[in-house]
């Protein structure tokens, strides 16, 4: 059965009717083909005709995204979901004007999670990324999360092309990474202290090219690169 927001969307946006076939996603890898049996104003009765399990991505990607001004974060979450990230951690960096208390942080996370839900319905992904409550970079680092390949998009001299990091990892381990993350800073980038703290844990600085990109462009570009490198057939050194 579908109820509430999802039933309203199916009935009044998609305009499904009795006897039609619909695809239902549960966000954790199951894709259900269903037939509409009955409905009223806020509920839809479905019967499952086929169930399909979609494997999880072999390398979960975490996007550590500094929260930009305005509603740009909504677009970033949407694009990140379409590009298959497993988790999005909104960051309240020193150069981010947004400040939220604990209650406000939870409300924002719930709102942003709904953006991700709408995005998987659009792109058809069977896996819904988790959108965490906003936190500072220091708070995230204090948790001690580990990644096979942690990267940070950097404007600093000496940052390497992302492919070099993938090749180096492959040389050391003989395989692709089993987990990865990418840190994306705010307008003006992370502060020097934040960069030092991020890189102190082994995160590798990577360049996104000679141009200074907008926050949302940097996030999409970085995730596209990660997808390309992780999905390319016959990856070798």
Image (cartoon, rainbow, N blue to C red):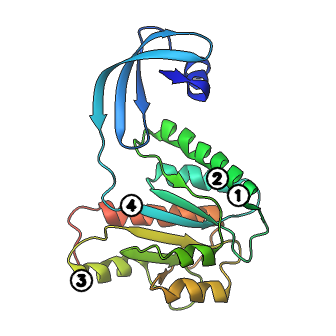
Q: Quadrant of residue 6?
A: top right
Classify 60 as above or below 128. Answer: below
- Dots 1, 4 in contact, CB < 8 A: no
Crowding around mark 3 (Cα neighbors within 10 Å: few <14, some 14 to 19, many 20+) is few
Q: Earlier in the sequence, mark 1 or mark 4?
A: 4
The residue identified by callout 4 is 60
Task: Give percent across and percent down for residue 42.
Answer: 61, 17
Name the disc covering residue 171, or none.
3
Crowding around mark 1 (Cα neighbors within 10 Å: few <14, some 14 to 19, many 20+) is some
Horizontal side of residue 105 vs 124, given as left or right:
right
Task: Give percent across and percent down for residue 65.
Answer: 60, 66
- Dots 1, 2 in contact, CB < 8 A: yes
User: How far apart are the alpha carbons under marks 3 and 2?
Assistant: 38 Å
Q: Secondary structure at mark 2?
A: helix
Q: Earlier in the sequence, mark 3 or mark 2?
A: 2
* Dot in front, 3 or 4: 4
20 or 211: which is nearer to us?
Answer: 20
Q: Earlier in the sequence, mark 3 or mark 1?
A: 1
Q: Residue at x 68, y 53 (%)?
A: 106
Q: Residue at x 66, y 78 (%)?
A: 189
* Dot in front, 2 or 4: 2
9 or 211: which is nearer to us?
Answer: 9
Q: Earlier in the sequence, mark 3 or mark 4?
A: 4
Q: Earlier in the sequence, mark 2 or mark 4?
A: 4
Q: Secondary structure at mark 3?
A: helix
Crowding around mark 2 (Cα neighbors within 10 Å: few <14, some 14 to 19, many 20+) is some
Q: Secondary structure at mark 1?
A: helix
Classify 223 as above or below 33. Answer: below
């Amino acid at each position: 059965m579908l109820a509430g927001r999802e039933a309203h969307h199916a009935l009044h946006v998609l305009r499904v009717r009795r006897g039609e076939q619909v695809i239902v996603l549960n966000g954790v890898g199951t894709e259900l083909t269903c037939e509409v049996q009955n409905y009223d104003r806020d509920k839809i009765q479905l019967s499952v005709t086929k169930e399909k399990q979609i494997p999880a991505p072999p390398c979960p990607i975490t996007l550590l995204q500094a929260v930009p001004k305005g509603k740009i974060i909504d677009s970033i979450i949407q694009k990140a979901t379409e590009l298959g990230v497993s988790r999005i951690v909104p960051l309240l960096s020193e150069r981010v004007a947004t400040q939220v208390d604990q209650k406000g942080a939870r409300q924002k996370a719930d709102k942003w999670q709904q953006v991700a839900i709408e995005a998987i319905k659009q792109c058809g992904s069977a896996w819904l990324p988790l959108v965490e409550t906003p936190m500072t970079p220091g708070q995230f680092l204090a948790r001690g999360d580990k990644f096979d390949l942690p990267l940070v998009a950097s404007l600093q001299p000496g940052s390497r092309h992302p492919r070099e990091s993938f090749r180096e990892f492959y040389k050391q381990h003989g395989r692709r990474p089993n987990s990865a993350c990418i840190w994306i800073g705010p307008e003006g980038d992370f502060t020097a202290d934040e960069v030092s703290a991020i890189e102190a844990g082994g995160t590798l600085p990577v360049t996104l090219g000679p141009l200074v990109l907008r926050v949302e462009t940097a996030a999409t570009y970085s995730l596209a690169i990660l997808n390309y490198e992780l999905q390319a057939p016959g990856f070798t050194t």
